[in-house]
Image (cartoon, helix red, strand yellow):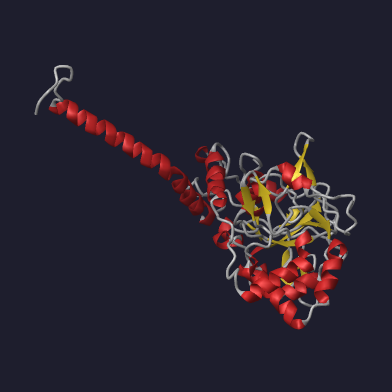
Amino acid sequence: MSVSKDQPALTIPRLYFKLFFFSVLSALSVEVQAQPELDFYSGKALFEKNWIPAPASTTASDGLGPYYNARSCNQCHPDGGRGSKEQSLVVHSNDPVYGQQLQKFAIPGIPVEARVEFDADQEGGYQIIEMHYGDLENSVLSPRLAPSLHGLALLESIPESVITALADEEDSNADSISGRANLVADENGSFALGRFGWKAGQTSLVKQVARALSLDLGLGNPLQPSPYGDCTEAQSQCLATPDGNSAHHDDLEAGETVLSLLLSYISGLPEPSQENADHPTVRRGQKLFNQTGCADCHLPEIAFGGSVLQPYSDLLLHDMGPGLADELREGIAAGSEWRTPPLWGLGQQNGEYLHDGRADTLETAILWHDGEAAKAKRKYERLTEAQRSDVNTFLDSL
């Protein structure tokens, strides 16, 4: 091997060092590339993890409750999807004694708040029984199913200006549709756009996750640090239970790492994709869906910054009439107002449609629409049976 006078010979030790140096750089590059995937699967493990009451032999997993609706995120959102009424129906309230939700379970040593019994003969298909603390002071209740989490990060990526530009609060075009953005006050009294939840009551994905950790699992976290979850001052036994705060979780029950990894998993859940989009029946159904006016609120596309999403929603509040009203306000949302739910992934459901699962079929769900959706419903009712079937087939393809 010839050696230039200007280039010293590469000795064996220097060769080893050079090979070692580039192998380390390569390993670091692989680690950086793999980190999002690692965080996703770590978050998935936390999402599926069953929490236990405190105190426990492992401080990394305790803190459940005292009141709770599930032991894991996955119990209400199986594989990140939408659960059944039996699994994931949560009864929202705004009561000084019972709190923001009626919890279905309690840790040993304290009484369960109440039980939800499904009964088709009852209004809404359910009744609340065995209420431990007596009657509600605020009798307004709102049963709601835990929605699918797929594609939520994409909905969060839509600029606020794009959503607010879709609003027509004064119905300036006289089409009887006057969607408006929900405005939600934060802890400082400032208002922000709500976009998550059945009434768009949460302004960001991290706040939605933190709220679920607190209310549904009773886990104190960076945004909602109380280890007692939804316990109120009237529930003294609940407030006297041991907490699960630990050094593993930043002196919380679910610390910053837990919250961050859960967000990595949920943010990585892709939007549902349409099936059989070019099938003649699906194409006919989509055309009728647009012609009836369903697409005026369930927007097929939202475009921004070179991206196009197909959530079939405008993410705005609409008055859906008295039949679906729950009279429970969130932000500026009135009792009869609901955020247009995205329809992507609708075909993966098996009945139990609408916010509380009251509708067994897609047709029944459509016929519950009223208020701003009354005109579209009437057009749907005037379709032939075959045309309705085409619309339903299209919806099942989403």
**Residue for point 12% across, 23% down:** 3
Residue 342 visible in the current orientation: yes
Q: Residue at x 58, y 68 (%)?
A: 275
Figure quadrant of residue 78: bottom right
Q: At which x and y percent is residue 271?
A: 59, 57
Which of 158 and 328 lies nearest the eye of the viewer? 158
Query: Front-most of 203 and 236?
Result: 203
Q: Is residue 147 left or right of residue 95?
A: left
Closer-to-camera residue (276/247): 276
The residue located at (88%, 54%) in the rendering is: 173
Tell me: 134 left or right of 349: right
Residue 190: give x, y in percent of width and height: 78, 35
Q: Residue furthest top?
A: 6
The quadrant in which the N terminus is found is top left
The front one of 388 and 113 is: 388
Judged from this view, the residue extending furthest toward the bottom is 385
Q: Which residue does the image show at 65% across and 47% down from the upper left?
A: 156
- 52 is higher (above) or lower (below) than 126: above
On the question of residue 233 being in view, the answer is: no
Indicate the position of residue 187 as horizontal and vertical percent values.
75, 37
**Quadrant of image for the C terminus:** bottom right
Q: Quadrant of residue 339?
A: bottom right
In the rendered image, residue 277, in percent from the top left (x then y), is placed at: 60, 68
